[in-house]
Amino acid sequence: MRTSNAAETEAFGQRLARSLAPRDVVLVAGELGAGKTTLIRGACRELGVDEPIVSPTFTIGRRYRGRVPVSHLDLFRLPTLAGEDPGLLDDYLTPDAVAFIEWPAVGAPAIAGRGGRVHRVEIRHAGGDEREIDLASG
Ligand code: ADP
Ligand code: MG
């Protein structure tokens, strides 16, 4: 679908969040500035998170307290998971939590098979403030 401003992308995240349950993982792909964090912010609000939602900067992830625990990862600075502690994501991908992952490509193998659903969101610039958002839920 198409959004024309940040609020519409937040609303998309909000609607998506209504279908999420613990163990679910939402992979959010798209270039810098596409609106990944914006979409996740909307989803987190729907999940009852009141804290500021910004991309994690000095760690790979943050945990928020909502009606369920929420994990927010950003793997942008992680060139590969090879050479990293294999349990690196375990603190975030806990069975009680809903998890959102920006720049998910590098983490994909570690993310599969956690028992929940995997939702893939892709956001693309479509001129000005327009964004094209695709969602595939497995
Ligand atoms: P990312 O996490 O993908 O790097 P952010 O969500 O942090 O991107 O930033 C997106 C920026 O683009 C924000 O400043 C937001 O206000 C702006 N923006 C403008 N139009 C849109 C839109 N349609 N959807 C999402 N963000 C938009
Ligand atoms: Mg971001």
Image (tube, rainbow, N blue to C red):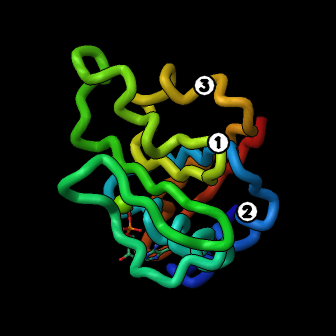
User: Which of the labelled discs sits on residue 95, or is there none?
Assistant: 1
Q: Nearer the viewer, mark 1 or mark 3?
A: 1
- Of the image marks 2 and 1, the number of the one nearer the N terminus: 2
Q: Residue at x 41, y 73 (%)?
A: 53
Residue 79's x, y, as percent? 24, 29
Q: Residue at x 65, y 29 (%)?
A: 114
Q: CA distance from mark 2 to mark 3?
A: 20 Å
Q: Residue at x 60, y 72 (%)?
A: 66
Q: Given the current orientation, which residue lies at the most extreme right position?
A: 19
Query: Helix, strand, or loop for circle 2?
Result: helix
Q: CA distance from mark 1 to mark 3?
A: 13 Å
Q: Nearer the viewer, mark 2 or mark 3?
A: 3
Q: Is residue 130 visible?
A: no
Q: Is residue 105 visible?
A: yes
Q: Given the current orientation, which residue lies at the most extreme top position?
A: 82
- Of the image marks 1 and 3, the number of the one nearer the N terminus: 1
Residue 118's x, y, as percent? 68, 38
For the C terminus, the quadrant is: top right
Q: Residues within 10 Å of mark 3 (few under 14, many from 20)?
A: few
Query: Helix, strand, or loop for circle 3?
Result: loop
Pointer 2 residue: 16
Taking 136 as reference, is 33 left or right?
Answer: left
Give whichever of 8, 62 is nearer the camera.
Answer: 62
Which kind of residue does numbered mark 1 sit on?
Pro
- Of the image marks 2 and 3, the number of the one nearer the N terminus: 2
